[in-house]
Image (cartoon, rainbow, N blue to C red):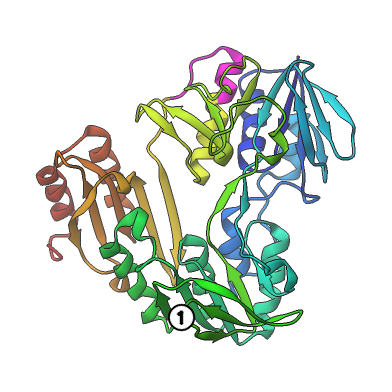
Amino acid sequence: MHIVIVGASVAGIRTAQALRVGGFDGTITVVGDEPHSPYDKPPLSKEILDPASDRDSVSLIDADALASLSVDLRLGVRATAVDIDGKLLSTDSLGQIAYDTLVIATGMRPRTLFAAEHFSNVYTIRSLDDSRAIRAELSRGRRAAVIGAGFIGAEFASAARAHGVEVTLIEAQDAPMAAQLSAEVGTALAELHSHHGVEMITGLQPHGFGGSTRATSVTLSDGRRVPADFVVVGIGATPAVEWLDTAGLVIDDGVRCDETLKALGCHDIYAAGDVAHWDHPMYGEPLRIEHWTNANDHAEIVAADILGTTAPRPTLPYVWSDQYGHRIQIIGRPALGSPTIRTGAATHGDLVVGYTDADDVLVGALVVDNPRLLMKLRRAVLAGEHRHEAEATILEATPAAM
């Protein structure tokens, strides 16, 4: 049996590992479009940009562990199409690769802005090359404009301030991450940026760039110009599925999959990680989750289904962000509720927010610098605790704040 995995990042490599741990002794080919040995993605906007760190990359798997997998790793190779009837993967440089089972783990492509490609100093953060180029800009630039105040933009802003670079953070919403966390909590997170000397501009759209080959400013929708030595764009990403246009798969905000992560209508094609839009067994609806932990979970589920073993139970969505020496952790799905429980402040490192739905059931939580409380709230979300129970859990952990 020959399993071909398209994507050499977290979901792809972890799937290969889970298959070997599960006893699969057939052939595994991993195709990755980047030339670099598999590396971890979260450090791209964290450790690699940190002036206190000399790390140029963070390996996803060390050389010995990679060798022990006995996989045929093909780097710098881009998948271009799939023939699902002939069971053939087409590539840009290796021709066609026959497979028995295909795992699609191609991740995301960062969104960017119109005309950004004309400027050599307008960046997104999605690859190791992106982070290396931005780190070089941080060593010589004095002013940075950041478009988008989600976690990528926020983490870059934090790193830039640590380099002594002036930062203007531009967010189209009225508060950072308002759609995901509420305007109230977004405003609380914005205070963390302001506290560290970042200029926040909210409620305005970027309309273009000044300069010729290098951007010298960002033009906003009110006509204002924000001067910048370089620009980082962090406005989200889209599933990397353009190469599947002619495959005949169901493509809807990613590859649509069932609860086992099989592509709908296929018995021999799976998707894993950010690209998978699957029937989430915990929530009973299709979800696509762009979290590092989700990619790891998917690898175990895919491997179990291929091997015919019992799949692990799905876990709650979880994501974290490191900003200005603080760790922000989010569990569950805050967007399903409202922030009805709140104590502390992000600037003090003790912000806690509980989100409850229309039935007053806890559906998500945000915690700053309190991992023990996060674990308690994880259990509370899983148990479907009501607001008063969750408040008691928070009161027990942070009595002074309450």
Q: Is residue 108 above or below residue 352?
A: above
Question: For this view, does 166 lie left or right of residue 267?
Answer: left
Q: Residue at x 70, y 33 (%)?
A: 244
Above/below status of 193 relative to 329: below
Depth check: give the residue in front, 385 or 62. 385
Residue 76 placement, left or right of 10: right
Q: Nearer the viewer, residue 309 or 111?
A: 111
- Report which quarter residue 211 is drawn in: bottom right
- Answer with the quarter of the image where residue 182 lies: bottom left
Asked if residue 94 is among those painted magenta in the image, a careful observer would answer no
Residue at image point 36% right, 28% down: 282
Q: Quadrant of the N terminus?
A: top right
Q: Is residue 24 left or right of residue 283?
A: right
Q: Position of residue 265 (x, y in %)?
A: 58, 17
Q: Is residue 310 magenta?
A: yes
257 lies above or below 160: above
Amino acid type assigned to the residue bearing label 1 in the image: Asp
Residue matched to label 1:
222
* Residue 29 seen: no
Query: Is residue 2 in view from this perspective?
Result: yes
x then y, percent, for residue 173:
39, 66
Q: What residue span does the magenta drawing correspond to?
A: 302-312
- The residue carrying pointer 1 sits among few (fewer than 14), some (14 to 19) or many (20 or more) residues within 10 Å by Cα, namely few
Quadrant in which residue 342 is drawn = bottom left
| 388 vs 143, nearest the viewer | 143
Name, please, the residue furthest toward the left.
388
As rendered, which of 270 and 346 lies closer to the eye?
270
* Residue 207 image point, x, y percent: 55, 73
At which x and y percent is residue 52?
58, 74
Q: Secondary structure at mark 1?
A: loop
